Amino acid sequence: MLYHIVFIRDTNMPTLSAISPLDGRYQAETEALLPYMSESALYRARVQVEVEYLIFLSRARKLDWVPPLDAPQQATLRQLYRNWSLASAEGVAAWDRKINHDVKAVEYWLRDRLTELGLEHWHELVHWALTSEDVNNLAYALLLQGARDRVILPNLQAIYAILRSFARDEADTAMLARTHGQPATPTTLGKEMNVFAHRLHRAMDGIAAIKLTGKLNGATGTYAAQVAAAPQIDWPTFSRGFIRMLELDPILLTTQIEPHDTIAELCDAIRRANVILLDLDMDIWRYISDGYFLQQALPHEVGSSTMPHKVNPIDFENSEGNLHLANALLELFARKLPISRLQRDLSDSTMMRSVGVALGYCLVAYSRTIKGLNKLSVNHPLLLQTVQAHPEVLAEAIQTILRREQYPEPYEVLKHLTRGQTPTLTDIHAFIAELQVNPEVRDELLALVPEQYLGIAPALARLAP
């Protein structure tokens, strides 16, 4: 239940003075996260929780001392967060500087707005029987849900779409595989790209499937204040209904804090997707190094300060570095956030504020991978030449067929011919000609060529998740 916000960055913060590159050099690439991971966004989400809680209270049947809010009044209140602006955030921040409490600042700012709207009768119902964590945990869950669904997953989907396009277009493009860095059974470029596409698709499903939780149960999770003031209400049912209304999963049994277990799950899930992209970045880097991929040379760019010929794989290298930064933080959050001393400590507070930093590094990495992939073209002649230059990879096929024919010790025979050697296709054909096998088998062996020894790789390249 997070509404789309048009967020305008504060232009008073020059990028050259920023400490973090996310707000400096990479500012344009992290812009999409501002409606979810900025301080203004956090203020807005808190206002959303407070407003919706006030409306929910006004609808409770057994709270006859709570004045009802009619439909126009409810709509007016909702405009306070739906029409959020930089001025709104500055108003809350002014209260925060005055009282040094960011959640209470939201309450006081909201009470001011109620006065302006002629709704003073509801002043004491703002933040009624809530602890700060009741508001914060729901606000963060809404923000993370929005960032995941509207920023992280769409960017991963963009990478996936490019990989699937490569998989389809290059399904039949033979490529020498390498295991342990050495020439191995040929594959196709499309099949290798589809491996990454399928892995990423599975990871995206895992990210999307996580249901973020929320709690609304008071200072130590006992509903004590609510029960003291209104014992006639079934507060666990009330809590469950409110949290589900926010499109979050309710958790009823907690200490003061929501335990952050699902946030940890989300961090782990994003980290796993990032590991797949690290693997992709490193493989693409090697394919560029081997000449399998060519990069578009932009005329205005410089590859080296001293070597004019260079077109470096900078996008994939930049992505790799930012993915490592993101994963270091995501792993830390997943390990630390679910831990809190006794019923509450504040060590999670500053860390929760930094979750956006991890997502910022993710977003920079994703944008660089997308940019790099879009600059690639396939060097088809070199791919074919390379696979044809290694006919020794046919040794696997030959010895496997000979095993089928019960030929004595074919593995050892082929090992003597090929291991550590560089036989030509002519050498291999001469070897086949001397084998004591049926003519049909000999013809089967002679028909083998490296660029066609692909198994079902072309079909696998076209396989959809």
Image (tube, grey):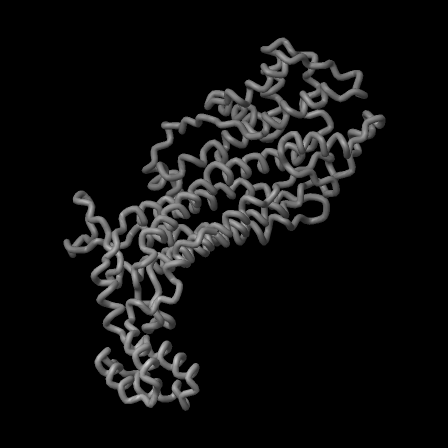
- Residue 246 x, y percent position in the rendering: 63, 31
Q: Position of residue 209 (x, y in %)?
A: 58, 45
Q: Hey, which residue is sitting farthest top in the picture?
A: 118
Q: Quadrant of the N terminus?
A: top right
Q: Is residue 252 left or right of residue 418?
A: right
Given residues 286 and 381, the one toward you in this image is 381
In this rendered view, identify the residue nearer to me: 74 or 355: 74
Residue 72 sits above or below residue 151 on the image: above
User: In the image, residue 428 lies at what x, y percent?
Assistant: 26, 82
Residue reaching furthest right? 232
Which is nearer the eye, 90 or 121?
A: 121
Please give the name of the residue rendered at 59% of the width and 29% of the height, measured from the top-left corner.
46
The correct choice, above or below, for 12 with respect to 306 in the image is above
Q: Residue at x 44, y 56 (%)?
A: 276
Give the image quarter of residue 229.
top right
Residue 324 visible? The answer is no
Give how far across and how far down residue 88 sits, in percent.
Answer: 51, 21
> Foreground residue, 160 or 116?
160
> What is the quadrant of residue 133 in the picture?
top right
